[in-house]
Image (spheres, rainbow, N blue to C red):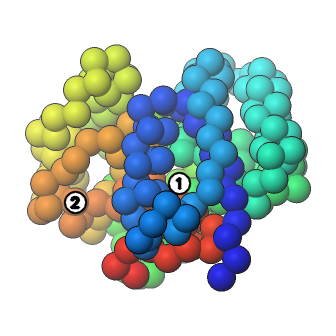
Amino acid sequence: MKQNSLGIIGGMGPKATAVFFDKIIENTVAERDQDHVDMIILNHASIPDRTAVILGGDSSGFLEEIGKDLRLLEIAGAAHIAIPCNTSHYFYEQMQDLTSIPIINMVEETIKLIHERFGSGARVGLLATDGTVQSGIYTTTSRQYGMELHVPNERIQRQVMKIIYTNVKNHMDFSSHELEAIIDELVMEQGCQCVILACTELSCIKLRPVYAECSIDAMQVLVEKSIVLSGRSVVGK
């Protein structure tokens, strides 16, 4: 299969982008350097915070900045674009209108995979930023597939935001116990068949196998789709 260059708009956040890059390398079937995916990575860390943009109601600054990145990737010859940030996908259609290069829809691909595994009627927990939760992007897409998206209560949502913004973004603390306790509550007490890790900061945390098995990591979904669209094979697939 022909090798296609993958464009990545990162920096949302920087550590999550580094993890995304590592995951593509680790999940690509390769015996030598030349077997890996060609990538153009823009680590645009100064781009406006996506949750703040959604809650503030003014997307013009964000879209102006992302538009510059999209033009750079066009010039660089990217065949597809991956944006490892769930919250940014609230602006998916507007971003896609700014470029002729297909942007991989992280949300759509994640919900599609969950539907394939659990079918219509599944109850799915969502762990994400306030911006992603309030945007409704996962809720809308889940309904299209006949699944029920379960949004955590205020107490759990505060914990999730603390993990994302304080533990990971600020202190680079990747301990898993707090996140695993939330997953356990959503599955064992609140009846979710699985839980979406719908923030790439959460994807930086390595879960123990029992918790990883009942979680769907949206970043991992994006990683695997990016590899396939770049003309390479995914390890174990």
Q: Give x and y (percent) for residue 164.
A: 35, 30
Q: Which residue is mark 1?
A: 138
How crowded pointer 2 is (Cα within 10 Å; few <14, some 14-19, many 20+) is rated as: some
Describe residue 36's horizontal placement relative to residue 25 as left or right: right
- Say what secondary structure mark 1 lies in: helix
Query: Which residue is more in the foreground, 235 or 92?
Result: 235
Q: Which residue is mark 2?
A: 212
Q: Give x and y (percent) for residue 70.
A: 79, 41
For badge 2, the amino acid type reads Ala
Residue 109 appearing in the image: no
Q: Give x and y (percent) for residue 103.
A: 72, 56
- Residue occupying image coordinates x 55% and y 73%: 232
Describe residue 69's horizontal placement relative to residue 138 as left or right: right
| C-alpha distance separating marks 2 and 1 | 20 Å
Quadrant in which residue 9 is drawn: top right
Describe residue 133's horizontal placement relative to residue 215 as left or right: right
Find residue 174 and name its label.
none
- Residue occupying image coordinates x 65% and y 23%: 47
User: Which one is earlier in the sequence, the residue at label 2 or at label 1?
Assistant: 1
Describe residue 188's horizontal placement relative to residue 109 as left or right: left
- Residue occupying image coordinates x 63% and y 67%: 230
**Viewport quadrant of the C terminus:** bottom left
Q: Is residue 68 above or below residue 143?
A: above
Query: Which residue is more in the foreground, 112 or 71?
Result: 71
Q: Give x and y (percent) for residue 23.
A: 40, 54
Residue 233 appearing in the image: yes
Query: Which residue is more in the foreground, 17 or 197?
Result: 17
How crowded pointer 1 is (Cα within 10 Å; few <14, some 14-19, many 20+) is rated as: many
- Say what secondary structure mark 2 lies in: helix
For badge 1, the amino acid type reads Tyr
Quadrant in which residue 193 is drawn: bottom left
Query: Which residue is more in the foreground, 170 or 123?
Result: 170
